[in-house]
Image: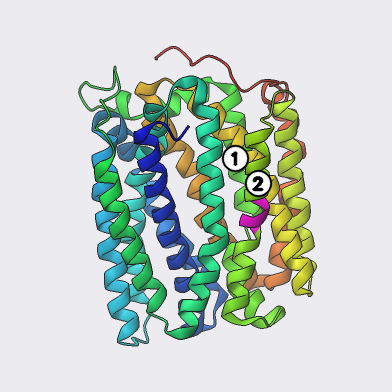
């Protein structure tokens, strides 16, 4: 896999951007909660990053299919670097208002909205089709490794000085920018050119609607993440329920990554060869079950174990879904399909955090997590009936679909 120079450089850039994002996530959540002690503001952190995905996803996907994906990634990393530099300045001056932070997160989310489809769509351009599922597993394992270490390092840096994790994130984005510019140029997808119109920008949505297996996978994860995500409330658990402080918050945020990394490494050695659809539904149901366990736990050890199980089960879901999307989608549509996927799955993490924050403000932190986990389990049961085509999927290595 790493004999492909383009993929090797891209993979290292992906590690750097992931580390930067982890530093930012753990620091901005703690900083905002430190200022306001209001769980609703933790939800607003997620909402500010979600809204640009929702507002721009038709344009972001079309851009990833019309222009060189490597250059889009470079511009977006540069904008993220500008945003985090401004946050460093705000934190260093000890401003008491969170409004400038929210404004910068909206701009930051806009850069992520354009970066995401280009980043996901470029992987099939860097490796042969027959190695794509392995590349996806390596991407996931590298990402999860950084997710394990990043929050811990971010929490430790925040304990020294609040601005340090933001400054470290900026340094990592600067290094990632250099690496992205070193990726060999990737030709524009065949068939992606043409006049920009509603017909072209909505092609990804139409493809997903017609391909019921892909639609089912995206819909399942959309509602699972929307209901089951409790990440936004981890600062409240760390401070008020488990009493483990900022370093403990880093450990809590790392726990899902530990489980996911172990599962990703297992999948590299033992790829899913059969019953992929059934395993997807089982994984999502288990995700909801262990979310309930975490929500009810008051013991740090049990909470970390539940979060690790959540991460492992989520990894199975990600592996199946991403392989389906990348292998089954024509290259000319990958940017637009991935843009829709990011809105309904990736960005739903932020919307799920907003949901968790609102429910926590209304009914309390613990009930908000438990109700969300139970809802996820219910979604898995209902979706298994609504999408029988997805349940019957056995193998993931279907030949690439014909271009639309």
In percent of width and height, residue 90 lies at 30, 80
Q: Element under label 2?
A: helix
Which residue is most to the top? 402
Note whether residue 268 is visible. Answer: yes
Q: Residue at x 44, y 24 (%)?
A: 206
Above or below, 77 against 220 in this view is below
User: Which residue occupies 45% across, 67% down?
Assistant: 23
Q: Is residue 225 left or right of residue 197?
A: right
Look at the numbered disc 1 and give the secondary structure of its residue. Answer: helix
| Residue highlighted by disc 2 | 314
- Tell me what residue is drawn at x 70 percent, y 60 percent: 307
Q: Is residue 258 magenta?
A: yes
Magenta-tinted stretch: 256-260
CA distance for labels 1 and 2: 6 Å
Q: Nearest the camera: 347 or 10?
A: 10
| Of residues 130 and 71, the one drawn nearer to the viewer in this rendering | 130
For the stretch drawn in magenta, what is the main secondary structure? helix
Whether residue 357 is visible to the viewer of this picture, yes or no, is no
Q: Are marks 1 and 2 in contact (CB under 8 Å)?
A: yes
Residue at mark 1? 318
Asked whether residue 279 is drawn in magenta, I would say no
Q: Which residue is located at x 40 percent, y 55 percent? A: 16
Q: Position of residue 165 (x, y in %)?
A: 41, 73
């Amino acid at each position: 896999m790493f004999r492909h120079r383009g993929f090797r450089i891209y993979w290292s850039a992906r590690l750097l951007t992931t580390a930067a994002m982890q530093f930012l996530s753990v620091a901005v959540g703690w900083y905002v909660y430190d200022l306001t002690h209001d769980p609703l503001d933790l939800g607003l952190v997620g909402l500010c990053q979600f809204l640009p995905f929702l507002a721009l996803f038709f344009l972001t996907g079309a851009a990833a299919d019309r222009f060189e994906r490597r250059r889009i990634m470079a511009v977006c990393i540069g904008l993220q670097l500008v945003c985090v530099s401004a946050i460093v300045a705000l934190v260093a001056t000890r401003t008491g208002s969170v409004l400038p932070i929210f404004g910068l997160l909206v701009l930051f989310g806009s850069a992520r909205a354009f970066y995401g489809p280009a980043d996901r769509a470029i992987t099939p351009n860097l490796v042969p089709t027959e190695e794509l599922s392995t590349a996806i597993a390596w991407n996931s394992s590298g990402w999860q490794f950084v997710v394990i270490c990043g929050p811990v390092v971010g929490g430790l840096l925040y304990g020294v000085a609040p601005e340090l994790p933001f400054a470290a994130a900026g340094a990592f984005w600067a290094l990632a920018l250099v690496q992205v510019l070193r990726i060999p140029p990737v030709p524009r997808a065949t068939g992606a050119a043409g006049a920009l119109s509603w017909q072209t920008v909505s092609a990804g949505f139409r493809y997903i609607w017609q391909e019921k297996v892909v639609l089912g996978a995206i819909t399942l994860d959309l509602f699972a993440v929307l209901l089951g995500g409790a990440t936004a409330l981890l600062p409240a658990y760390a401070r008020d329920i488990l009493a483990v402080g900022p370093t403990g918050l880093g450990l809590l945020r790392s726990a899902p990554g530990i489980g996911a990394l172990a599962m990703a490494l297992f999948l590299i050695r033992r790829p899913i060869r059969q019953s992929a659809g059934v395993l997807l539904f089982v994984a999502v149901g288990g995700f909801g079950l262990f979310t309930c366990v975490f929500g009810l736990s008051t013991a740090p050890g049990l909470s970390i174990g539940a979060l690790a199980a959540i991460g492992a089960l989520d990894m199975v879901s990600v592996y199946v879904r991403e392989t389906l999307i990348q292998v089954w989608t024509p290259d000319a549509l990958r940017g637009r399909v991935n843009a829709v996927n990011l809105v309904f799955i990736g960005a739903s993490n932020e919307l799920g955090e907003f949901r968790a924050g609102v429910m926590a403000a209304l009914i309390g932190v613990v009930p908000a997590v438990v109700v969300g986990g139970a809802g996820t389990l219910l979604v898995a049961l209902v979706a298994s009936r609504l999408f029988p085509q997805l349940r019957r999927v056995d193998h993931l290595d279907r030949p690439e679909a014909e271009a639309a």
